[in-house]
Amino acid sequence: MQTPDVIQAHIRDGLPRLETHMAAWVTDHLIQPRLISVQESDSTEETLEVWLVTDHTGDNDASLRIVFDEKTRLFGHEFLTESPNQCSLLLELISEDFAEVVQAM
């Protein structure tokens, strides 16, 4: 099974377990999964390729996006940090359970 199919299967399993407003948010912000590069922490310049699962739409956006790490098989949050000298996309991996990651937003 290809990674986007694995992601979609996890989403299908997790959506029914979410409260109505959270499931609606996910549905509104889901995208066709695509690879992006993020930093694992702000203390390193090394990047990691993860699958972006949700994206900003301009309506009811969260401050973070949901991602999936193919190597660890974990979903997590990607978020932007800004300092005077740089902007970074950072990563926080949380769980194999998509619904748990949504609820942790």
Image (tube, helix red, strand yellow):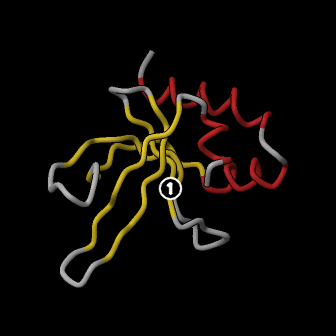
Residue 94: % across, % down: 50, 39
**Percent position of residue 7, x then y:** 52, 30
Residue type, mark 1 in image: Arg
Query: From what the image shows, is residue 5 above or below residue 78?
Result: above
Quadrant containing the C terminus is bottom right
Query: Which residue is found at the position 67% from the left and 38% from the top?
Result: 99
Image quarter (top left, top right, bottom left or bottom right) of the N terminus: top left
**Spot occupied by residue 8 in the image (x, y as percentages of width and height):** 57, 30
| SS class, disc 1 | strand
Q: Residue at x 17, y 54 (%)?
A: 44
Farthest bottom residue in view: 84
Q: Please name the residue that numbered disc 1 is placed on.
A: 65
Residue found farthest to the front: 43
Measured from the top left, where is residue 19 in percent x and y? Answer: 82, 46
Residue that appears at 15% across and 49% down? 46
Q: Is residue 35 left or right of 26 when viewed as pictured? A: left
Q: Nearer the viewer, residue 60 or 5?
A: 60
Q: Residues within 10 Å of mark 1 (few under 14, many from 20)?
A: many
Residue at position x 63%, y 33% in the image? 11
Judge whether 83 appears above or below 32 on screen.
Answer: below
